[in-house]
Image: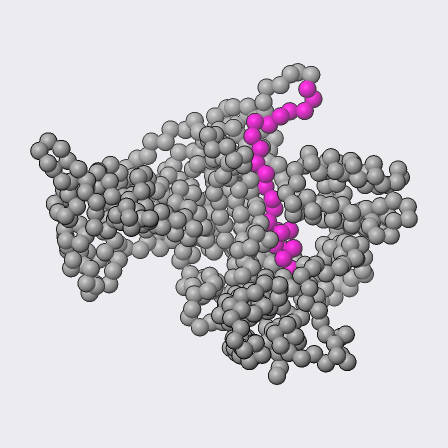
Amino acid sequence: MSRRWIQNPNRCADEYLDGIEDFIEFARRHNPGATRIRCPCRRCNNTLWETIENVGFHLVRNGMIETYSIWNLHGEQVDHASSSNAPRVDNVEPIVDPNDQVMGIIQDAFPFASTNINQEGEDEVPTPIDSAEFEQYEKLLKNANQELYPGCESFSILAAIVELMHRKIKYRMSNLCFDYFLGVFKRMLPTDNCLPKDHKHAQKVLHGLGLGYEKIHACKNNCMLFYKEHETLDTCPICNDSRFKMTSQNRTTKIPQKVMRYLPLKPRLQQLYMSTHTATDMRWHKEKRVDDDVMRHPADGEAWKEFDRTFPEFAADPRNVRLGLATDGFNPYGVLNQHHSTWPIFAFPYNLPPWKCMKKEYMMMTVLITEDPGRSIDVYLRPLVDELKDLWTNGVRTYDKSTGRMFTLRAAVMGTVNDYPAYAMVSGWSTKGYMACPVCTEDVTSGWHAGKVCYLGHRRWLPWDHEWREKDKEFDGNTERRLRPREWSGDEILEQLNRLDFAPFGKTVSRTRPSTHLNWTHKPMFFELPYWSKLKLRHNLDAMHVEKNVFDTLVGTILDIEGKTKDTIKSRLDLERMGIRRGLWMNRDSDKARRDLAFFSMKPNDKK
């Protein structure tokens, strides 16, 4: 039987699913009575034993090993005459010459640096690189051809540095530890070796491969960046604070008060097309995605399809990149009693298939902010928004390795993904107070219940004839006759924001918000993107936080865990005040009141 289905990258195709059924039937037939068999998926690699049902699930999720075309580990008889040519299934990394690997990296980074280019047909061949890039190419080529020490044929200087840096990242080695072992290796090698003495010098050798970052000074009060027209200023024009720290007069270099790291997006997007496999996967959403009205990928959503209808010229080329942005704060030192947090902003390409687009290998950090910026996050987004505007309007010339041609790469942000506090920062709508819902805006149903602001009226979103609209005792004691709140378009929101006058950014600025501003704190910088107001869905809540909060609340209430349950004394008194759920009111005996165990909470024996 043909086993070409193993090579099919679309694991939802009928051919692939039928092939899995054939394999399962083959395994059952050749292993009668067996409950577990070796799993040939890419993750288990025929080394782990799983139930036959789990093997089928793994093959759909992970895919089968592409070289496992002869099922000898599942009962297939191998012709000994040709067994020497049968592919082996090993769980080891393939042996690759590091020098050849490094030369491949250089060729990917500078595909036409050493070839003569015919300028006829601009879309057929790439444009030549400039003198600065060619100088970087020559330095890398020199290090790739020079032996690590005289007589060393295994490693060149560049191959050794790439190998060591790769292991440093893989095993999470600190710079201090890396410097120590680099010094040890240098002493072990012959005295005339060319190994760098520390991490800083190793980075200089790799600098020509690109993917660096820019240091941009910022006002210590988050008022502005010393960027573009403000690059030469020494004081902030908003708060008049100094750009640099006070140091001794003998010091020649000035120390900035605050520094933001910006990692340009264009070279990172170009990197996605340097590999044949990645370049092909970047067209997956258009050429290989199964369109069967099942939601597996953002391309299956209505927001993506609406964007295609609004901007058909952008959608015509599947190589144009659709991006998502995400940000959140974390304490890099792991000390919980410190309030310091670092805020990275990540971009991830939605063009890739769902099993790749959210992998860390394809997430690109674009901005690194060294403290919680609050509403001033737009100050730090300025370089990113400027680059995104240029990527939409002009694009960037990029070499597509899969076709061998140059094309103009354009990019658009399809939306952001954040938790609820970060949602307020990037959307400009405060998620606190009585109008915290960014969808209902001023038409929100909210009230003070059990010591906090609660948002009710969820039945308004149900169909008009839904049975829950008529139930009053099960909810807040009233039937629901209202329609769902009006949905505001992006153009209407932009028009509303343009009429409002917001205070400048910064810690020193008063945050008193007029009632006319509703819950708007600032006009988001993303509205400078020409397409932002046309998006159907601009901001998203990440599923992890939603799932965790719902799970914690549900389990904490059912198990009646102190500090986790929502069935508190305050909530019981609030039910009594509203006159609903009489069975959950506080039980009063003489001068005492007690909270009896609710019917939905488990008893102590049931908890065990």
User: Residue 437 vs residue 135: left or right?
Assistant: left
Residue 49 at x, y percent in the picture: 56, 65
| Residue reaching furthest to the bottom | 1
User: Residue 432 vs residue 190: left or right?
Assistant: left
Residue 536 at x, y percent in the picture: 40, 58
Residue sitting at x 64%, y 51%: 267
| Residue reaching furthest to the top | 249
Q: How are the residues colored?
A: one colour
Residue sitting at x 21%, y 47%: 598
Labels in figure, total: 0
In this view of the protein, which residue sits in the foreground, 77 or 102?
77
Q: Is residue 218 visible?
A: yes
Residue 40 at x, y percent in the picture: 60, 68
Residue sitting at x 59%, y 63%: 48
Residue sitting at x 32%, y 34%: 513
Q: Is residue 516 visible?
A: no
- Magenta-span inclusion, residue 266: yes
User: Residue 590 vs residue 53: left or right?
Assistant: left
In this view of the protein, which residue sits in the foreground, 454 or 133?
454
Tell me where the magenta segment starts and ends, as one range. 251-273
In this view of the protein, which residue sits in the foreground, 308 or 463?
463
Quadrant placement of the N terminus: bottom right
User: Residue 51 vs residue 573: left or right?
Assistant: right
Residue 181 at x, y percent in the picture: 74, 38
Residue 279 falls in image quadrant: bottom right
| Residue reaching furthest to the right | 151
- Magenta-span inclusion, residue 344: no
350 relative to 130, above or below: below
In this view of the protein, which residue sits in the foreground, 505 or 90?
90
